[in-house]
Image (cartoon, rainbow, N blue to C red):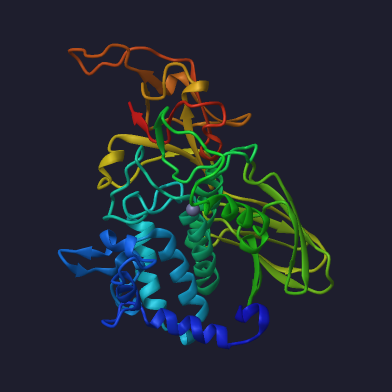
Amino acid sequence: MAQVTGNEGYRALGDRMIAARGLPASAFKAECQIEDGPSARYRPLVVRDGQYEGSYFQDHAPLEECSEVVGHAVRAMYYFCGAMDCAANGRYDDALGRLWANLVGRRMYITGGIGSAGANEGFTADYDLPNRHAYAETCAAIGLVMWASRMARRFQSVEAVGVLLRALYNAVLSGASQDARGYFYANPLESQGEHARRPWFECACCPPNIARMVLSVERYLAWEDDAGLVLAAPVAGRYEVGGHVVNVESDYPWGNDFTLATETQGTIAVRVADPFGGQGTLSWDGGEARSEDGWLVAHALGGGVVRGRLGHVPEFVRSHPLVPENAGRLAAVDGPIVYCAEAVASEPSPNAFRVRASAKPKRSSGGLRVEGTDLSYAASLYSGSAELVGTPRSLDLIPYSTWSNRGPSVMRVWLAEA
Ligand SMILES: [Zn+2]
């Protein structure tokens, strides 16, 4: 409201509401105690052994003292965004840096989904990232895009750009079916066929939130800072930022090549994030550049065309060994896109496949393909040796965001390692 109206009173109000969190005199606690009050139904989530414990409301401690992301995931994201927008002089920057490290280092799915538990619609403990029973609400991923965008701008953080893109292209977009008539509230990373998108929810926060995010996505992809224009990703489009117009042509995220050109006169530096691999290149009339610290920089763009290539290739990745759910498993990624295997396009079931860690998935139409020489699968229920039998011809992987568009099906992001 302060940005739109110019009335700084709104910002001061936001700052005051954030500073009121986690204090002994809690308005949230008082509201919960009102018999039949609007917050009475939250009592089971905030009263432990007769004592108020406000993490569900982000009311457990003042923000300056926080180091772990806890409680309701959507609330947490909107809270951190508000703290960055409203507080003067970077008052919460240290705490937000700690919370960010905890989230992306220990409590975030590879898809950018966050808030693994349905009980509190939120966070649990470090490395507790169940796949099949993941909550990972669509709105929480949208909130993460919003927070990551602010972290990327405030700290020129290419890591934050990477998180923004992972969440946007996976945990956000999986929330809607391709015909936009069905929605996921929770976004699991594994299904045994029990999940399907629904047309609506009693608490229908996610469907309009996806609409808002998709229709305003350019705000998260391009911005201006002291050094010039910044592109989080070279998504094709026409961007009007700070009096400059930049046209981008590409088939990102499916290809690595792009061109960008400015319509406006004069010179301006343009930075393009290269967060996955960091081996990209840029060239323009009179200059060229390689990725440095995850950024590609064209120093003097003035009406000319810049040709670029991002550095990422399809690959299998492991998760941290302390994530018990993913021990002995691999997931395929290609830049921002996380891939999954779905039974409707896979014979045998994705549950049976074993993938060699050395496998090099290749881009194919609509996804990635793993060749049979990198695969095997178990064909009997029990056997006396660890030997696996069967050599399937190939395994096709589809973007995670597009799963469950062909009917209920077994689906896995994390495949067993051979
Ligand atoms: Zn929601």
Q: Is residue 32 left or right of residue 260?
A: left
Q: Is residue 163 left or right of residue 237?
A: left
Say which quarter of the image contains residue 212: bottom right
Q: Is residue 120 left or right of residue 77?
A: left
Q: Position of residue 263 (x, y in %)?
A: 83, 65
Looking at the rendered image, the quarter that the C terminus falls into is top left
Task: Confirm whether residue 200 shows in the render.
Answer: yes
The one of 260 and 160 positioned closer to us in this rendering: 160
Extreme residue toward the front, this view: 36
Residue visible at 49% across and 74% down? 82
The one of 320 and 57 positioned closer to us in this rendering: 57
Q: Is the residue 406 above or below the residue 81 in the image?
A: above
Looking at the rendered image, the quarter that the N terminus falls into is bottom right
Q: Position of residue 368 (x, y in %)?
A: 54, 31
Residue visible at 77% across and 74% down? 243
Q: Is the residue 135 above or below the residue 30 in the image?
A: above
Task: Confirm whether residue 68 shows in the render.
Answer: no
Q: Is residue 297 left or right of residue 382?
A: right
Residue visible at 46% across and 51% down? 112
Q: How many marks?
A: 0
Residue visible at 69% across and 44% down? 251
Extreme residue toward the left, this view: 49
Q: Position of residue 160 (x, y in %)?
A: 49, 62
The one of 368 and 269 positioned closer to us in this rendering: 368
Q: Is the residue 192 above or below the residue 288 in the image?
A: above
Q: Position of residue 196 (x, y in %)?
A: 49, 33
Q: Is the residue 309 above or below the residue 100 in the image?
A: above
Say which quarter of the image contains residue 6: bottom right
